[in-house]
Image (tube, rainbow, N blue to C red):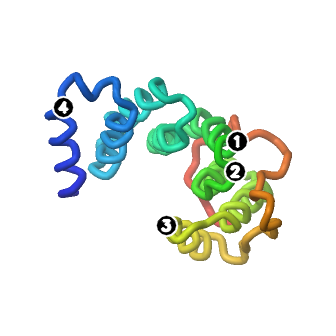
């Protein structure tokens, strides 16, 4: 938490000047998440989205913070929005898969996990590790090299149950 604490101190030194800066709010949200300051993380991520509504990173921070409060039904449409902005953003598929899985929609969860694996980057290695450990047998979806992996059409994840993920 040392770097996160340092980041918060630097942001606090900005005072009100950072209040209207989307990047400062996003950085504050990420630091608060790392420090377990969930409400502060959500507040800062929400402010970043207000300031920059199509910033996938701000949207991602807000959706993850919402999930920290078991507010999956609010997070799910944000992940859908992120996938529209960046169809190759593996974490959005991963978290959509967790939401589907927690609501018992294991086929949809598997599809999201497969798309997540198909779009994973070296920075997303944690996704591969998590899926292989918790959802054995899920493999990357086959996608064309020219077209980004896209979510299959199907039911919306807007009303998932509020339960912890389980295995498929």
| Residue beneath disc 2 | 87
Residue 55 sits above or below residue 4 on the image: above
Task: Please tell me which residue is depicted at 75% across the width and 57% down the height of the picture.
Answer: 148
> Depth check: 17 or 35 in front?
17
Residues tagged 2 and 1 counted as in contact (Cβ below 8 A): yes
Task: Please tell me which residue is depicted at 65% across the width and 47% down the height of the picture.
Answer: 86
The image position of residue 159, as x and y in percent, is 69, 35
Q: Earlier in the sequence, mark 3 or mark 1?
A: 1
Residue 117 sits above or below residue 74 on the image: below
| Residue beneath disc 4 | 14
| Residue beneath disc 1 | 84
Q: CA distance from mark 2 to mark 4?
A: 34 Å
Density class for disc 4 (Cα within 10 Å; few <14, some 14-19, many ≥20) is: few
Q: Earlier in the sequence, mark 2 or mark 4?
A: 4
Task: Please tell me which residue is depicted at 17% across the width and 41% down the height of the picture.
Answer: 10
The image position of residue 123, as x and y in percent, is 49, 66
The image position of residue 54, as x and y in percent, is 57, 33
Q: CA distance from mark 3 to mark 1?
A: 21 Å
Identify the secondary structure beneath mark 1.
helix
């Amino acid at each position: 938490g040392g770097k996160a604490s340092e980041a918060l101190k630097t942001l606090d030194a900005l005072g009100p000047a950072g209040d209207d800066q989307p990047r400062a709010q996003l950085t504050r949200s990420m630091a608060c998440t790392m420090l377990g300051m969930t409400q502060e993380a959500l507040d800062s991520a929400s402010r970043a989205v207000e300031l920059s509504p199509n910033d996938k990173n701000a949207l991602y921070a807000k959706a993850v913070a919402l999930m920290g409060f078991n507010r999956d039904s609010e997070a799910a449409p944000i992940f859908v929005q992120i996938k529209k902005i960046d169809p190759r953003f593996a974490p959005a598929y991963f978290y959509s898969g967790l939401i589907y899985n927690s609501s018992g929609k294991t086929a949809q969860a598997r599809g999201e996990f497969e798309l997540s694996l198909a779009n994973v980057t070296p920075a997303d290695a944690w996704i591969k590790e998590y899926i292989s450990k918790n959802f054995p047998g899920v493999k990357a979806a086959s996608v064309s090299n020219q077209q980004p992996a896209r979510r299959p059409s199907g039911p919306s994840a807007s009303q998932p149950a509020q339960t912890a993920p389980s295995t498929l």
